[in-house]
Image (cartoon, helix red, strand yellow):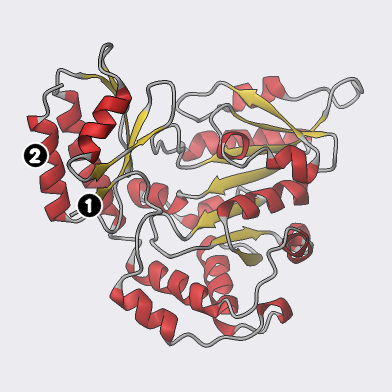
């Protein structure tokens, strides 16, 4: 039994999801003739109350398309220092859109309206880049699955409106945040200009991300997707997996969150653990005490068929997910409590 807690992207399709994939009606999506892809996109529009949605093969491509839609070369994005678009998208903002990032040191990957206000470059000061876009990530990856306060998001939106800035949400794990906080997706749809939601993380599909937005913003999105090489054909098979996930895998995220919380509680009681960050959703971030090399700890776990990941600077990560069973959970907790450095 291999217990893989490196990410929630390691899951395999369930039997029900495979049945949905095999029975999907398909067409050529480049012509927008794939009925299942069109259905998935409409489902997201209805769920979030937004005008237009488009299926992308990856979350990175969807985020990069959003940046391209909102900016021109030479512009600047405001985002957190730990943001995915800056740390984990291979410099795509600069390469694809010719924009720079003004980084804010937020709290666990979350920034405030006051910080955004202070970071906006004066539009008449031509020596600095023109601030055009504010980007948030919810939940935050490097922040350990932290969830934004919706009221703070509304305050940031007010700053954006005052200064004529676009507002994008990297919602790769937004469904986790919605489940954890009991929030209405339409509240997010009414605030952000564009939102990306990943299907292959907590929702457990093999691939795919949906980018949503208002019609006037998204009208060029299919062209940008084509430019980025994302034009696809019979994608209804993967869209069917997304529809199945919306119907069957959202409420069950509570199990992932509960198991992550239980793991965090155990870690807090172990004398070789220096710190465990607050655990709100399915990500646990923790640090070892000085004198215990993280490579040795990870290798010891690996020898017991348990895999976790390192995010650098001593930050270790555990992610619970669809394929992490109760049997695995019991085994992992046993290994942790019996571990001797």
Q: Percent x, y for residue 285?
A: 33, 31
Q: Percent x, y for residue 127?
A: 90, 20
Q: Is residue 141 above or below residue 248?
A: above
**Badge nearest the viewer, 2 or 1:** 1
Q: Is residue 25 left or right of residue 338?
A: right
Residue closer to the observer: 291 or 46: 291
Image quarter for residue 134? top right
Residue closer to the observer: 314 or 298: 298
Q: Which mark is residue 58?
A: none
Label 2 secondary element: helix
Name the residue at 60% across, 50% down: 60
Q: Is residue 302 left or right of residue 12?
A: left
Name the residue at 74% across, 34% down: 162
Q: Are marks 2 and 1 in contact (CB under 8 Å)?
A: no
Q: Report crowding for label 2: few under 14, some 14 to 19, many 20 or more residues within 10 A (C-alpha).
A: few
Name the residue at 66% across, 78% down: 29
Residue closer to the observer: 229 or 112: 229
Q: Is residue 304 above or below residue 47?
A: above
Closer to the chain start, of discs 2 and 1, is: 1
Residue ranking furthest to the top: 290
Q: Is residue 184 above or below residue 159?
A: below
Q: Percent x, y for residue 126?
A: 92, 23
Residue underneath mark 2: 334
Name the residue at 30% across, 45% down: 5
Which quadrant: the C terminus?
Answer: top left
Which quadrant: the N terminus?
Answer: bottom left
Residue underneath mark 1: 2
Q: Percent x, y for residue 223?
A: 79, 64
Q: Is residue 122 above or below residue 178?
A: above
Q: Report crowding for label 1: few under 14, some 14 to 19, many 20 or more residues within 10 A (C-alpha).
A: few
Label 1 secondary element: loop
């Amino acid at each position: 039994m291999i217990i893989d807690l490196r990410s929630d992207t390691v899951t395999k399709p369930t039997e029900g999801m495979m049945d949905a994939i095999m029975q999907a009606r398909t067409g050529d999506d480049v012509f927008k003739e794939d009925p299942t892809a069109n259905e998935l996109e409409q489902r997201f529009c209805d769920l979030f109350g937004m005008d237009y949605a488009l299926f992308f093969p990856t979350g990175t491509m969807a985020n990069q398309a959003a940046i391209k839609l909102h900016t021109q070369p030479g512009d600047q994005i405001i985002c957190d220092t730990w943001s995915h678009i800056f740390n984990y998208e291979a410099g795509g903002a600069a390469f694809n859109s010719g924009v720079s990032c003004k980084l804010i040191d937020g709290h666990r990957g979350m920034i405030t309206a006051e910080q955004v206000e202070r970071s906006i470059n004066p539009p008449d000061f031509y020596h600095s880049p023109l601030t055009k876009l504010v980007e948030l990530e919810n939940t935050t990856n490097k922040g350990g699955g932290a969830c934004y306060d919706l009221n703070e998001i509304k305050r940031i939106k007010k700053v954006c409106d005052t200064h004529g800035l676009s507002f994008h949400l990297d919602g790769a794990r937004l469904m986790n945040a919605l489940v954890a906080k009991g929030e209405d997706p339409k509240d997010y749809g009414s605030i952000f200009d564009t939102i990306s939601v990943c299907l292959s993380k907590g929702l457990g599909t093999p691939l795919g991300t949906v980018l949503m937005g208002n019609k006037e913003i998204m009208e060029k999105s299919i062209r940008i997707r084509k430019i980025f090489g994302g034009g696809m054909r019979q994608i209804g098979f993967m869209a069917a997996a997304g529809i199945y996930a919306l119907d069957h895998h959202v409420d069950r995220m509570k199990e992932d969150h509960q198991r992550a919380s239980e793991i965090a509680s155990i870690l807090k009681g172990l004398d070789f653990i220096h710190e465990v960050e607050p655990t709100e959703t399915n990500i646990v971030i923790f640090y070892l005490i000085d004198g215990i090399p993280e490579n040795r700890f990870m290798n010891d776990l690996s020898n017991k068929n348990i895999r976790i990941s390192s995010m650098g600077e001593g930050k270790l990560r555990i992610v619970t997910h669809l394929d992490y069973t109760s049997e695995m959970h019991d085994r992992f907790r046993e290994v942790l409590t019996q571990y001797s450095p």
